[in-house]
Image (cartoon, rainbow, N blue to C red):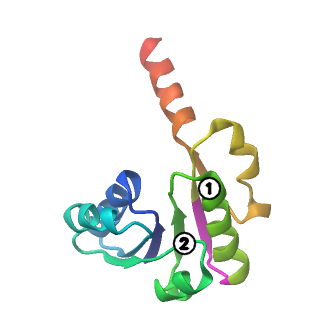
Amino acid sequence: MHILVVGGGQVGSYLAGLLSTDGHRVTVLEAREAAVQLLHRTAPDALVIVGDGTDPRALEDAGVRTADVVAAVTKSDATNLVITCLARFVFGVGRAVARVNDPHHTWMFSPTMGVDVALNQADVMAHLIAQAVE
């Protein structure tokens, strides 16, 4: 499967490494030159493209038209929503997954915004800690 990960920070680079190890063809689109070094260490098999995930041309350069899945995992909820909207509604990507940074924004991450799966780290962590306490 071809997976386009947009955002190459700690979450994106770790995700790209996991997906590459599982045998997927992974491309990472990252705007910050400084993050590229981390990507080369954590996901050496991934193709890394430097560019802005909210720019349709950068998404095309990263291969969005051939991607089976787009994972928007930047630190900005607004950016992640723009990426999923572009991926689903402009480029017709079959599946879009988005990172939700602020739990109060979860309601926006819906299929009408191009998101198939929204992952809220704070919610996941809170539930795991609550289970561990019980």
Q: Is residue 100 above or below residue 112?
A: above
Tell me which residue sits at (75%, 62%) in the image.
Answer: 113
User: Mark 2 falls on what kind of element?
Assistant: loop
Q: Amino acid at mark 1?
A: Val
Quarter location, residue 98? bottom right
User: Mark 1 falls on what kind of element?
Assistant: strand
Q: Is residue 94 magenta?
A: yes
Tell me which residue sits at (47%, 11%) in the image.
Answer: 134
57 or 26: nearer the eye?
Answer: 57
Q: Is residue 116 visible?
A: no
119 or 134: nearer the eye?
Answer: 119
Q: Position of residue 30 (x, y in %)?
A: 42, 69
Q: Position of residue 85 (x, y in %)?
A: 70, 70
Q: Is residue 92 magenta?
A: yes
**Image quarter (top left, top right, bottom left or bottom right) of the N terminus:** bottom left
Judge from the rendering whether residue 89 lies leftward or rightward of residue 68; answer left or right. Answer: right
Tell me which residue sits at (23%, 68%) in the image.
Answer: 40
Q: Is residue 104 above or below residue 112?
A: above
Name the residue carrying label 2: 53
Q: Local crowd at mark 2 within 10 Å, few (<14), some, or many (≥20)?
A: many
Which of the two discs, 1 and 2, labels the residue nearer the N terminus? 2
Q: Position of residue 24 (x, y in %)?
A: 35, 74
Q: Which mark is residue 117?
A: 1
Q: Which residues are magenta?
A: 91-97
Judge from the rendering whether residue 28 lies leftward or rightward of residue 58; answer left or right. Answer: left
Q: Position of residue 77 (x, y in %)?
A: 62, 52
